[in-house]
Image (cartoon, grey):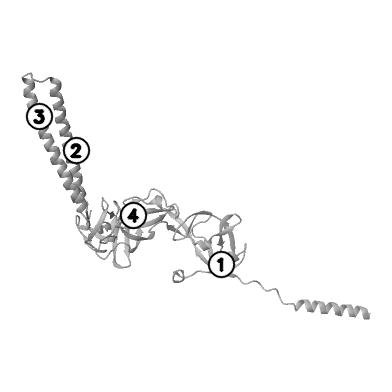
Amino acid sequence: MNNLLRALGSLSLCLLSACQQPPEEVAAPRPVWVMSVGTTQANASPSYTGEVKSRYESSIGFRIAGKIISRAVNVGDLVKKGQRIAQLDPNDTRLNALAAGAEVQTAQANLTLAQSELARREQLYSQRFISKSALDSYETQVKTAQARLAQTQSQAAISQHQTAYTQLLADRAGVIGMIQAEPGQVVAAGQTIAQIYDLKTLEILIAVPEARIGNLHVGDSATITLNEVAQTFEGRIREIAPAANSQTHAFDLRIQLLSTDPLIKPGMTAEVRLKATDATQRLIVPMTAVTRHGDKAGVWVIDAKQQAHARTVTIGPLSEQGVEITSGLQPGETIATIGVHALTEGMPVQAIQPSPEVLR
């Protein structure tokens, strides 16, 4: 009997102890940033940073070698077409021109003499005093003298041109962007002496990713903003490079300024916003929302019960707005954007919708 009472007492103590055990704690939902997926007009107004350049940047130099004796301009000077930039020592070319002129006079005298001899021989031939072969030889001498005169005249013209080439003239109006000419300096033919920038044909050079180049065409409009100039300018695409840069894989575009301002200078930084050319509605999500599900890209979809579920998606090209989702996601669904790497299938989450100020 005592044994039975002791057994009942032990059972009661066990039951009482079991009832007093605290219940297991339920894990708190993990807070994550979320967003509602919507369509956006991709490529609506992409903007790019570029550099102001002149369409015509002329590198000019002397057409002959020589020693510089004077320089007429400095960097930053405005020049007109035909204005003198620098000059070589003209003494050697002037002497060559004088020698060539003397050669012309000699050839002219020889031709006159040969023509006189031919006239006398023609009279003798008409009187049958000389043979036809003797007359032919004098005709040949006249033709030789004529050819020699033409040759010396060409050489004299070249010598005159050489004298003119001692002056380096601006081939267009613009501003001197670079000059490498000092009196006493000996330069080679074709060596760059100065660069002239045409300020009337300014444009913006930008680089566009290969994913965007298919939607752009020559003549498309653009809006240009310069930090140094408190004004917005209109432009249009003048040139699209036919091949991408081998290092950046981007295409060079030149945006022509339709109007200009004296404050705009070559080398300034400009922001170019291209016209919307692709009206296709696409799903764009932040890069932080995309993770890997196995060997495929995926996102975490948050359902109505505030639970996370992995979803495999197909991604498209990248842009400044984010990454495009081409399949696997529908407009209106909610996805996690920050904190995705800590999520597991079916995990309860606390959805946090960041304000626009935080996103900026």
Between residues 176 and 122, which one lies in front from this camera angle? Answer: 122
Label 3 neighbour load within 10 Å: few <14, some 14-19, many 20+: some
Q: Is residue 35 left or right of residue 103?
A: right
Q: Nearer the viewer, mark 3 or mark 1?
A: 3
Query: Pointer 2 and pointer 3: residues touching (CB < 8 Å)?
Result: no
Q: Is residue 259 visible?
A: no
Q: Amino acid at mark 1?
A: Gly
Q: Which mark is residue 254?
A: 4
Q: Amino acid at mark 4?
A: Arg
Residue 89: name its quadrant: bottom left
Which residue lies most toward the right here?
A: 1
From mark 3 to mark 4, how far is it between C-alphas?
A: 70 Å
Q: Which mark is residue 151?
A: 2
Q: Nearer the viewer, mark 3 or mark 4?
A: 3
Q: Nearer the viewer, mark 2 or mark 4?
A: 2
Q: Which of disc 3 and disc 2 is earlier in sequence?
A: 3
Query: Pointer 1 and pointer 4: residues touching (CB < 8 Å)?
Result: no
Q: Amino acid at mark 3?
A: Glu
Between residues 134 and 29, which one lies in front from this camera angle? Answer: 134
Q: Which of disc 1 and disc 3 is earlier in sequence?
A: 3
Q: Position of residue 113 (x, y in %)?
A: 10, 33
The residue that mark 3 highlights is: 117
From mark 1 to mark 2, how far is it between C-alphas?
A: 87 Å
Residue 80: name its quadrant: bottom left
Q: Which of disc 4 and disc 3 is earlier in sequence?
A: 3
Q: Position of residue 36 (x, y in %)?
A: 49, 63
Q: Is residue 138 left or right of residue 66?
A: left
Residue 114: name its quadrant: top left
Q: Is residue 321 left or right of residue 336?
A: left
